[in-house]
Image (cartoon, rainbow, N blue to C red):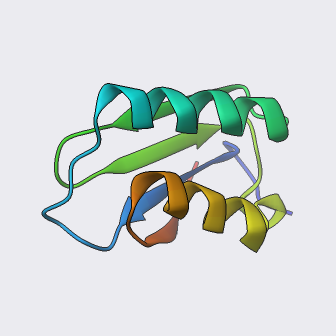
Amino acid sequence: MWHGYRMFRLVAEDPTIALNEMQAARITSWLLELIPARGCHVRREPVVEITITGHYPEDFHLPLLRRVEEIAGCRFSVSVVDG
């Protein structure tokens, strides 16, 4: 179990990609609907970063990551935020 804050980030592996408003809204609503997270913030400009709060990273399963990648059109890596 993680101690401290339950928070992690998905960071786009392509540093040149940007998301439009529709992609960011879809990712946010989709993630908040499917995982018990307290919040989700999407930074749309390069480097794209999605911060998920109130949820443990080990509970973020591969099919969820793949769906985010499909919406965004790029691959993401998971970065744990120490808290």
Residue at coordinates 55% horizontally, 39% vertically from top-left? 27
Q: From the image, which quarter does the N terminus lie in?
A: bottom right
The answer to whether residue 80 of the structure is visible from this angle is: no
Image quadrant where residue 31 sits: top right
Q: Position of residue 33 (x, y in %)?
A: 79, 30
State the count of labels.
Answer: 0
Q: Position of residue 4 (x, y in %)?
A: 70, 46
Left or right of 5 in this view: 75: left
Q: Position of residue 49 (x, y in %)?
A: 36, 50
Left or right of 30 in this view: 74: left
| 58 to 71, vertically: above or below | below
In-front residue for pair 54/35: 35
In-front residue for pair 13/70: 70
Left or right of 34 in this view: 21: left
| 51 to 73, vertically: above or below | above
Image quadrant where residue 44 sits: top left
| 9 to 6, vertically: above or below | below
The answer to whether residue 22 of the structure is visible from this angle is: yes
Residue at coordinates 74% horizontally, 73% vertically from top-left? 62
Residue at coordinates 58% horizontally, 48% vertically from top-left? 83
Q: Position of residue 51 (x, y in %)?
A: 49, 42
In-front residue for pair 80/33: 33
Image quadrant where residue 80 sits: bottom right
